[in-house]
Amino acid sequence: MEETIDLLVKQVEERKGELIQLLTTLVSYKTPAPPARNSHEAQLYVADFLKNCGFSIDMWDLYSNDPIVVGTLKGQKSADYQSLIINGHMDVAEVQENEKWETNPFEAVVKDNMIIGRGVADMKGGLAGALFAVQLLTEAGIELPGDLIFESVVGEEVGEAGTLQCCQKGYTADFALVADTSDLHIQGQGGVITGWITIKSSKTYHDGTRRSMIHAGGGLLAASAIEKMAKVIGGLQELERHWAVTKSYPGFLPGTNTINPAVIEGGRHAAFIADECRLWITVHYYPNESYDQVSKEVEEYILAIAKADPWLKDNLPTFEWGGTSMIEDRGEIFPSLEIDEGHAGVQLLAHTHEQIEGKKPPIDVSTSVTDGGWLADAGIPAAIYGPGNLANAHAVNEQLDINQLIQYTKVMVQFIYTWLHTHKE
Ligand SMILES: [Zn+2]
């Protein structure tokens, strides 16, 4: 079979026109998120593509007009051979009207061996490469002993739970590859969790009572929720600095573990003392930490500050963590993903990359976040490995090096073949 696989890898080069056409087709579906709710046609295209390759299809709505597609190609000897999930997202970063694109972002063009269009780097290039690899393998009639699961999700750009739902539905494998932007590095990632901190007064006061609650002899034990939130913000900065000093992770600049006070809302109008204030924060943490752990650290720190305050101690801040969509419920979680360099899947991927590229791939961390975290959170060993770089992800005139796309597709052909022919340990 070695010869067959060599021939297939060579075919990627010979048939690169088809690969570029496939990517051009994916780009032509307008799937920016936000606004989202626009991926039905694109996802139907993937479902048909996988069906033609012999996959059985499970398709359901994450939201109306934003379905998830999971294709399964059952292996000949599933019980004995390694299985693989390939995961990618069909939604792309938004395109704003005033952006100065040289070309129509949804009509991909090739120029100086780069392909330009929205999503080519993040991550329709990765999807196209992985789909084309699957097509080459199945067209050649190659029987794959292990199970192959292809997850085409939506909503990743706005923190929606497409991949989480795949995990909750029970899709699992011995190894998972997220084909998101990694410049052909094998990557883990830190995590992100958003949260809302709310300070609420049990009583509402007229603006005219302010003197009584802040000046000598006023005698009114009350407070502005906005002013108390300033104390919380100060506390978050102290904790952020403490984390920067005491925590680190190889591959990240010190202090990458930030706590961003991103949005603040509070008060009724100018005739009232603010009786409620809500702060939306974004917490970044390292691959060896969990969202449960860091959110608990934030709560404990802020509650300790609040308990030392004469008014906050009886009006303790409350916390709401995470969410399933930045659009629907203003919250998200991207769990972290730590690469296990000793895992057979990671080793085989690195080896395959080296065979095709002639040099070892860097194994490091993404400075962004992907759905890889949800796979890791579900206990599936996973890695991010895709074409395109972060300078191009979300950028105007987003582009991808066609040579890199070809190399990626070659690695995928050989990796899928070899991994699914590897005995389970
Ligand atoms: Zn992405």
Image (cartoon, helix red, strand yellow):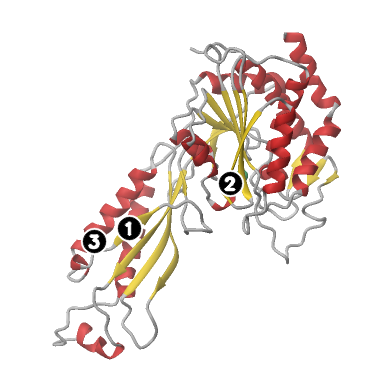
Q: Nearer the viewer, residue 404 or 166?
A: 166
Q: Which mark is residue 319?
A: 1
User: Can residue 85 be seen?
Assistant: yes
Q: Nearer the viewer, mark 2 or mark 1?
A: 2
Q: How far apart are the alpha carbons under marks 3 and 1?
A: 14 Å
For label 2, the residue is 61
- Left or right relative to 267: residue 103: right
Task: Give the mark nearest the N terminus, 3 or 1.
Answer: 3
Q: Nearer the viewer, residue 110 or 143?
A: 143
Check disc 1: other Cα within 10 Å, few if <14, some if 14-19, many if 20+. Answer: some
Q: How far apart are the alpha carbons under marks 2 and 1?
A: 30 Å
Dots 3, 1 in contact, CB < 8 A: no
Q: Residue at x 26, y 52 (%)?
A: 300
Kind of residue indicated by mark 1: Phe
Q: Nearer the viewer, mark 3 or mark 1?
A: 1
Q: Residue at x 80, y 33 (%)?
A: 19
Q: Which mark is residue 136?
A: none
Q: Residue at x 21, y 78 (%)?
A: 222
- Left or right relative to 370: residue 282: left
User: Can residue 153 be seen?
Assistant: no
Task: Give the mark nearest the N terminus, 2 or 1.
Answer: 2
Kind of residue indicated by mark 2: Asp
Q: Determine the image quadrant of residue 314.
A: bottom left
Q: Nearer the viewer, mark 3 or mark 2?
A: 2
Q: How far apart are the alpha carbons under marks 3 and 2?
A: 44 Å
Say if 188 sits above or below 222 in the image: above
Disc 3 secondary structure class: helix
For label 3, the residue is 305
Check disc 3: other Cα within 10 Å, few if <14, some if 14-19, many if 20+. Answer: some
Disc 1 secondary structure class: strand
Kind of residue indicated by mark 3: Ile
